[in-house]
Amino acid sequence: MKYNHWAILLLGFTLLGSWPGRAADPVATWSAPASAIERWQGWRFGLFIHYGPISLKGTEISWSRAGERRDRQENITTGVPVAEYDNLYHQFDPTNFDARAWAGIARATGVKYVVLTVKHHDGFAMFDSQLTDYKITRTPFGRDLAAELARACRADGLHMGFYYSPPDWHHPDFFTTNQARYVAYFHGQVRELLTRYGPVDELWFDATGGKNTPETWDNQTLFPMIRQLQPEIVVTTRCGGWGDFDTPEQRIGAFNNQQPWETCMTICQQWSWKPDDQMKSLRECVRTLATCAGGDGNLLLNVGPRPDGTIEPRQVVRLKEIGAWLKRNGASIYKTRGGPWQPGAYGVSTRRDTTIFVHAFKWTGESLTLPAINARITSARVLGGERVAVSQSDAGVVITVPAAQQDAIDTIVALKLDRPALSVPVIDTSAQ
């Protein structure tokens, strides 16, 4: 496999020469601006897309590749043999791929941003990198899928992000005595992504386990470059611990209004496409989204397109169902912060301006009791519906909603306050 080592080395020298000094507190210095993080938190919901030649096999991206994983000190003997896995791209031809269709599905889902896997651990580039021939433009498809999707998403008013794996089990220099040459390649591809694909809002690094330190990836060169090229970008903490937000995987993060976070979760079971994969119900998807927002986090919900470049119709139906729910209830998700009541058996709460949104999952008859708050509730209504009864005392807040107005998935009650909702202290509801 051809890697353009001269171009990589020139890029490496350029990167190193650009930053002769070292920051005293590099993690803080090269973090995203608070305004960028706040804007990203306000989006609350994004679409993750795992895609590549492995869709031809219907097995998991990267992890189904047999062979050596030097960073993890593993040699896998099961799965798709290396010679077969690494040559799938010769057959990869998603002729029915339509970037506008993908963007339209994302828009209909109600997400505010899309994150595409442009290089997973298997090393295959889903963009037209000039540093390797192991890429989408050297397949029968022959087009830069990442560029087409980025343009389509922005045309549809969506923000764009890229997933990029620092580990690369395909690259011959990775975790060898030539690691410095690999790091130059890694930095060079990041530079390509941040200079040739327009505004990039999220960079989803994915280095976990093994020897994952700032020194492994030369973060003191990498992060200043990132911040210079895309000043507003937010970055995962999966690159030697540097970055802006944490990434609970396949689970909902705990309440945390101090450290930004984003749950990444599959709509089915596998990240990449799998035939007849078990899909999550609308109830599970909606409650996951609401609970992430109630915990003060984002949700990045993943789909894996099929080999022909289309997203499975049943998944599209589910995504559009989520979008329909958000059309009715988006005010309780977008631009909200978690709390004041922490997530509990009752459900979750979100807040913005002078309103608390109670997402009630569990009722005792027609009433729900929550701990007292230090603000006066001036009105209460089911979101998009009628007023409901609410009473306050030192013993707590009692919300009463007739059974006919309760929703089996998520009954949302908007409580109007006499002061900003964010002024109400966070309240533990573990006993609720």
Image: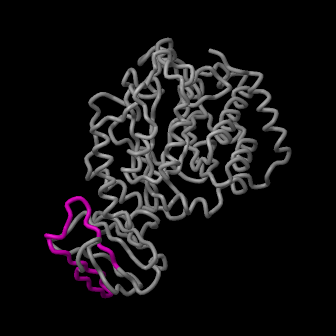
Question: Which one is nearer the viewer's eye here, 233 or 172?
Answer: 233
Asked if residue 232 lies left or right of residue 22, the reply is: left
Which percent across, then down, holds residue 332? 37, 67
Which percent across, then down, holds residue 168? 59, 27
Which percent across, then down, holds residue 340? 41, 72
Asked if residue 424 lies left or right of residue 281, the reply is: right
Q: Decide whether residue 78 is among the magenta residues.
A: no
Is residue 352 positioned above or below 88 on the image? Answer: below
Which percent across, then down, holds residue 260? 53, 58
- What residue is drawn where x is 46% and y is 20%? 92
- What residue is drawn where x is 75% and y is 42%? 221
Is residue 376 positioned above or below 332 on the image? Answer: below
Question: Which one is nearer the viewer's eye here, 121 or 312?
Answer: 312
Q: Please tell me in which quadrant of the rendered image residue 356 appears.
A: bottom left
What range is drawn magenta here? 388-415
- What residue is drawn where x is 70% and y is 35%? 187
The number of callouts visible is 0
Please name the colour scheme applied to the rendered image: one colour
Rendered-image quadrant of the N terminus: top right
Is residue 332 positioned above or below 386 on the image? Answer: above
Q: Decide whether residue 398 is among the magenta residues.
A: yes
Rendered-image quadrant of the C terminus: bottom left
